[in-house]
Image (tube, grey):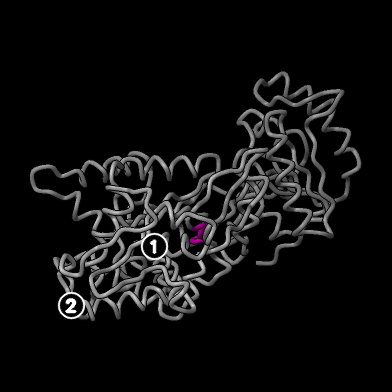
């Protein structure tokens, strides 16, 4: 199908403009006219800035709010008056030019009246297609008799929209946080996999000493925190040969320490010295990064690696992005993913912290996704969380699944890359 571009492409701005952005990028018209009601001016400004950066050869016009007459877009009489008094001033110079109107957004009465206010060459509409493999643009085209005829829809699936451009439609700033430096350590991924395996183990083994340490870390850092710099734990209480534990602690220290003097964990012949949380949160950022990784960042590292393993490239997802609107600092997201033409907000949880509830996971994700358009909310949890909540006499997991469904949160239990591949419907 041969589609020529348009001299003027008119878009009705709404809260969610990803579909309209894709159409503009596809057609690359000479002029784009963003019609925004008074309530949609901020959204239109963001849309305009994205278009200006992606289509430098296109003139972008934002109309609908002026000192003479602002468009409200809710009542027929008001819309009709704006079309005749304001919009007609622009269309007066469009004769003998190709002109199209995209009515995907906007209020119903605005779409209805503006479609009749000018002899458009084409009318476009993209339906919301959640999780669809293809993106279709429906089209009506004016024939020689002036009648609008339904045309074969356009497949816009191949029209790429960058993740950052999609997010800039909804936020003022995207601040990239520095990833945990341990992710770059060549041995961290193997230790992370051992950490995941340890969640299903009853006791430590020579091959995987993690279970001997995790309960001690949790007790010292969260259950019974102390103001002391460190806590001494006797080897005899760790239920594993001290030589095996010392070798494993050396591996953990090597994630951040270049020498023994800067090691996080230390020991003597009697036992292991574990730094307190208060000490770890002091200015030495490497120690804090180590504690964050041990406490849960290890699972985020696995998820990031699994996304790469199943075929997502680094242009399709970003980790640790803080989405800021207005003057607020905004909320940090674990991972933003562009998949099947839609933004996915991923929240990742390795365990249920003491004093927290499963419902707080969903509430946190829903809060961070609020105002980001028609995104897909994805909560990824470790099998350990499901197992803890699936007690035969008090099955909190079934209740949590229902809560996620009601909140339109896609709940995933991921123990390997194949789990993500299946849940994200990667073929």
Q: In the rendered image of this protein, does residue 198 appear above or below residue 358?
A: below
Q: In the rendered image of this protein, does residue 286 appear above or below residue 66?
A: below
Q: Which residue, given by chain and number where applicable, does mark 1 sit on?
A: 424
Tell me if mark 2 has few (under 14), some (14-19) or many (20+) residues whose alpha carbon lies within 10 angstroms of its own. Answer: few
Tell me the quadrant of the picture where the C terminus can be found. bottom left
Q: In the rendered image of this protein, does residue 349 appear above or below residue 266?
A: above
Q: Which mark is residue 14?
A: none
Residue 128 in picture, x, y percent from top left: 51, 47
Residue nearest the observer in this picture, 386 or 180: 180
Residue drawn at point x = 44 percent, y = 74 percent = 255
The magenta stretch is: 335-342
Tell me if mark 1 has few (under 14), some (14-19) or many (20+) residues whose alpha carbon lies within 10 angstroms of its own. Answer: some
In the image: residue 272, left or right of residue 111 = left
Tag 2, which secondary structure?
Answer: loop
In the image: residue 97, left or right of residue 306 = right
Residue 226 in picture, x, y percent from top left: 34, 49
Q: Which residue, given by chain and number where applicable, does mark 2 sit on?
A: 241
Residue 411 visible in this rendered orientation of the protein: yes
Task: Give yes or no for residue 130 being in the magenta stretch.
Answer: no
């Amino acid at each position: 199908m041969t589609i020529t571009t348009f001299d003027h492409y008119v878009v009705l701005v709404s809260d969610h403009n990803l579909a309209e952005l894709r159409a503009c990028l596809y057609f690359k018209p000479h002029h784009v006219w963003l019609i925004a009601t008074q309530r949609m001016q901020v959204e239109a400004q963001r849309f305009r800035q994205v278009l200006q950066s992606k289509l430098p050869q296109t003139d972008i016009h934002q109309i609908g709010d002026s000192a003479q007459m602002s468009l409200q877009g809710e009542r027929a009489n008001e819309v009709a008056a704006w079309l005749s008094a304001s919009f007609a001033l622009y269309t007066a110079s469009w004769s003998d030019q190709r002109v199209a109107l995209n009515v995907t957004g906007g209020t119903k009465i605005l779409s209805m009246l503006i479609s009749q206010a000018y002899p458009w060459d084409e009318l476009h509409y993209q339906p919301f297609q959640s999780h669809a493999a293809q993106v279709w643009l429906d089209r009506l085209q004016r024939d020689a008799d002036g009648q609008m005829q339904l045309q074969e829809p356009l497949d816009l699936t191949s029209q790429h929209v960058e993740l950052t451009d999609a997010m800039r439609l909804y936020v003022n700033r995207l601040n990239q946080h520095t990833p945990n430096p341990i992710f770059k350590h060549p041995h961290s991924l193997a230790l992370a996999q051992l950490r995941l395996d340890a969640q299903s183990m009853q006791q430590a083994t020579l091959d995987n000493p993690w279970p001997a340490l995790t309960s001690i870390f949790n007790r010292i850092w969260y259950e019974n925190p102390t103001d002391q710099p460190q806590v001494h734990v006797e080897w005899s209480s760790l239920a594993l040969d001290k030589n095996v534990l010392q070798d494993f602690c050396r591996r953990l220290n090597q994630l951040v320490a270049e020498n023994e003097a800067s090691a996080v964990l230390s020991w003597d012949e009697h036992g292991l010295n574990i730094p307190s949380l208060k000490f770890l949160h002091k200015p030495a950022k490497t120690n804090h990064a180590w504690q964050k990784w041990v406490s849960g960042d290890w699972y985020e590292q696995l998820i990031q690696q699994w996304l790469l393993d199943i075929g997502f490239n680094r242009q399709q997802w970003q980790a640790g992005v803080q989405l800021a609107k207005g003057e607020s600092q905004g909320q940090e997201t674990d991972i933003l993913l562009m998949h099947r033409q839609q933004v996915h907000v991923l929240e990742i949880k390795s365990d249920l912290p003491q004093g927290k509830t499963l419902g707080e996971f969903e509430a946190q994700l829903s809060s961070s996704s609020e105002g980001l358009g028609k995104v897909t909310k994805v909560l990824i949890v470790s099998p350990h969380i499901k197992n803890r909540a699936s007690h035969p006499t008090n099955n909190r997991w079934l209740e949590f699944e229902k809560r996620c469904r009601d909140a339109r949160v896609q709940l995933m239990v991921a123990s390997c890359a194949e789990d993500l591949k299946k849940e994200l419907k990667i073929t």
